[in-house]
Amino acid sequence: MSTPAERDWNTTPATAEGWLDRAREVAALFAVDAVARDRAGSTPHAEVALLKDSGLVALLGPVEQGGGGQNWTTAYRVVREIAAGDGSLGQLLGYHYLWFWTARLIATPEQVAAVEQAATRDRWFFGGAVNPRDNDLVVADEGDELVFTGRKSFSTGSKVSDVTVLEGVLEGTDKHVFAIVPSHQDAIAFNDDWDNLGQRLTESGSVEIRGVRVPWSDALGYVDKQFRPQVYNTLNVPLIQLVFTNFYLGIATSALTTAAAYTRSRTRPWPYAIDVKDAAIEEFHVLETYGDLRAKLWAAEALADRAAELVEAINTHPDTVTERQRGEAAVVIAAAKQRAIDTGLEIGTRVFDVTGARATANTTGLDIFWRNIRTHSLHDPLAHKRAEVGRYALLDEIPEPTWYT
């Protein structure tokens, strides 16, 4: 992997296409040793540093602070590009964008300005300890301070993050509290126990929160200990669900292009066919398979892009978005997610049909794509996404906002 010094990253891209070009440069560097790093399971400190040096971590940040000033459409495309280089890094960057945006979703205007200024200027990399399937962190009110305590099974970004988003419930109430805190402090213990089939470099292990102290002024959306959110604050879930969709698509794209390169250079034609070909690329079943998979991937990408348009429409008026607008966006995102998963898993499996037995060698690394999508696509059951779309199609019902919808 070449060093940032060899790249002209001193200039901030002024356009969305410029940022996508930057993302492709970074993804190409990641792709060089993605398989070796996956096999080693090493913490991606150098790779996160590259995301910072390239400026991609500040893509959504204000231009006056050195950020890209881009919208979520660009962010989703960047996630897709980075995931094509390394699926784990695509997930890390996508989660980072969501947590970077947390203040925009629930904080006061003053807090939004302060968080985005610091995060953009200092190029913070965000992690999060907000797994809703676990018990909430307990938040104690100690006068001028809040104290967070508890455990979360997953904390994507953990050791490679500069700051971590915490979420808990104020003791004795039903009030949720979000806060952004330094990741590296004695009161936070990352357990380094992420040992999964795929997405191995996302540092998604468990975390112990052992009395993290936060001033009340840093409780996002609170003024005088009362919650006064800036916007309709259930928009975080559709945003992250579409992040998932886009890094699945990036992984699937890489699976297809990697397999195609192997087929062109190494796959041998079948010598016992009725009509023996001189090269594998001339065999009908090979051409038909690549054509089928490419068409399905284009269709999945188009649906994801349509979903992004709905997200952008909501972001133009977050304070006045209606339940119907949010619900219809969530339905299209659910549809895009199921298409991305189905297509990605199919590509990750069928590429072996057109590469051959020798392509199963560990050095080839074609297994990484299916493993990555299979692992993360279990985040929340796909059957429920299909049912959400089904209820909309059959009964014109929109999904109720939850931690997963």
Image (cartoon, helix red, strand yellow):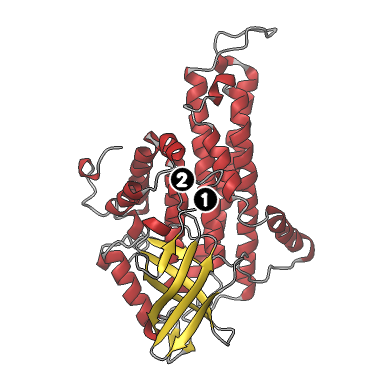
Q: Nearer the viewer, mark 2 or mark 1?
A: 2
Circles 2 and 1: CB distance less than 8 Å? Answer: yes
Question: Marks 2 and 1, Cα distance to the nearest angstrom?
Answer: 8 Å
303, 182: nearer the viewer: 182
Which of the 4 image quadrants contains residue 297? top right
Q: Which residue is mark 2?
A: 83
Disc number placed over residue 246 in the picture, else none: 1
Direction from residue 199 to residue 13 in the image, left or right: left
Above or below, 383 against 62 in this view is above
Disc number placed over residue 24 in the picture, else none: none
Above or below, 175 against 291 in this view is below
Callout 1: SS:
helix
Callout 2: SS:
helix
Direction from residue 49 to residue 307 in the image, left or right: right
How many badges with numbers are in the image?
A: 2
Which residue occupies 42% across, 59% down?
158
326, 25: nearer the viewer: 25
Q: Amino acid at mark 1?
A: Asn
Which residue occupies 59% across, 71% down?
135
Can residue 156 be seen here? yes
